[in-house]
Amino acid sequence: MTACTVGTALLGHRLEHDHEVAEVLEPFRPHRFLALRLMQLSPHVRVERHGARMSRVDHRAR
């Protein structure tokens, strides 16, 4: 999740490897955790989700 969040927030695309994340976060070196946490809490950073959605369950028949 970290690579996806950092890549989406700062570059606009997903990152695949930890060393890429380390390179991107290098300018924030003394405060990398704080920068990452702010990216995770930001409502403007949304990671793309792929996959099927769960179907709705009708509980009225029970």
Image: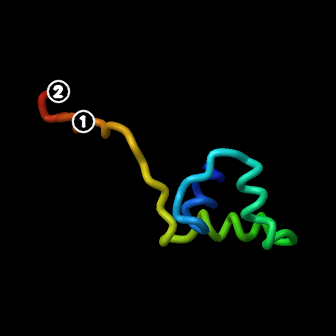
Residue kind at label 1, given as amino acid type: Ser
Q: Residue furthest left?
A: 61
Q: Please give the residue where the numbered disc 2 appears in the rendered image.
A: 62
Q: Nearer the viewer, residue 5 or 41?
A: 5
Name the front one of labels 2 and 1. 1
The image quarter in which residue 53 lies: top left
Name the residue rendered at 42%, 48% in the picture.
Answer: 49
The image quarter in which residue 33 lies: bottom right
Q: Quadrant of the C terminus?
A: top left
Q: Position of residue 44 (x, y in %)?
A: 48, 72
Name the residue rendered at 75%, 69% in the picture.
Answer: 34
Give the Cα distance between marks 2 and 1.
Answer: 17 Å
Q: Position of residue 14 (x, y in %)?
A: 56, 53
Q: Nearer the viewer, residue 48 or 41?
A: 48
Residue kind at label 2, given as amino acid type: Arg
Secondary structure under tag 1 reads loop
Q: Position of residue 52 (x, y in %)?
A: 32, 37
Q: Is residue 41 left or right of residue 62?
A: right
How is this picture coloured?
rainbow
Which callout, 2 or 1, points at the residue further toward the start of the chain? 1
Numbered label attached to residue 2: none
Q: Is residue 27 left or right of residue 5?
A: right
Q: Position of residue 3 (x, y in %)?
A: 64, 52
Q: Is residue 56 left or right of residue 32?
A: left
Figure check: 42 above or below 8: below
Numbered label attached to residue 55: 1
Secondary structure under tag 2 reads loop
Name the residue rendered at 61%, 68% in the picture.
Answer: 10
